[in-house]
Image: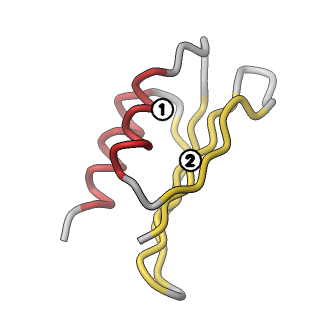
Amino acid sequence: MKMHLKIFNKNGTVVTNTRTVKKRRILYLIQADKTPNARFFIKVTYSKGFTNSGEYSSKQDVLLAFNAFMEK
């Protein structure tokens, strides 16, 4: 399972762009982010051709979506 996280500031500039297979790293980057009015893009690839992705405007929304993407 591969994960991709992008965090944008209010101007649309990428602040963080990370690809990893570790869930803990994604959670840390979301919670440690201090960017005001940040937008988050998250994409989880399960296998070739099967993905979940979305763009969110709050930490709470992106964490809920990430937890939903991780359910089996």
Task: Please indicate whether residue 22 sits to the left or right of residue 54 in the image.
Answer: left
Q: Alpha carbon of mark 1 to alpha carbon of mark 2: how far?
A: 9 Å
Amino acid type at mark 1: Leu
> In this figure, which residue is indicated by the disc labeled 1?
29
Q: Residue furthest bottom?
A: 48
- Position of the N terminus, as image quadrant, is bottom left
Whole-percent x, y for residue 9 in the image: 70, 23
Q: Given contact means CB atoms under 8 Å apart, are the residues at marks 1 and 2 in contact?
A: yes
Whole-percent x, y for residue 25 in the image: 42, 42
> In this figure, which residue is indicated by the disc labeled 2?
5
Q: Residue at x 33, y 60 (%)?
A: 69
Whole-percent x, y for residue 33 in the image: 52, 21
Task: Please indicate whether residue 11 sits to the left or right of residue 17 in the image.
Answer: right
SS at circle 2: strand
Residue 62 sits in which quadrant? top left
Q: Nearer the viewer, residue 41 or 18?
A: 18
Q: Residue furthest left?
A: 72
Q: Residue at x 46, y 82 (%)?
A: 50
| Above/below status of 45 relative to 37 | below
Q: Residue at x 62, y 34 (%)?
A: 7
Number of numbered discs: 2
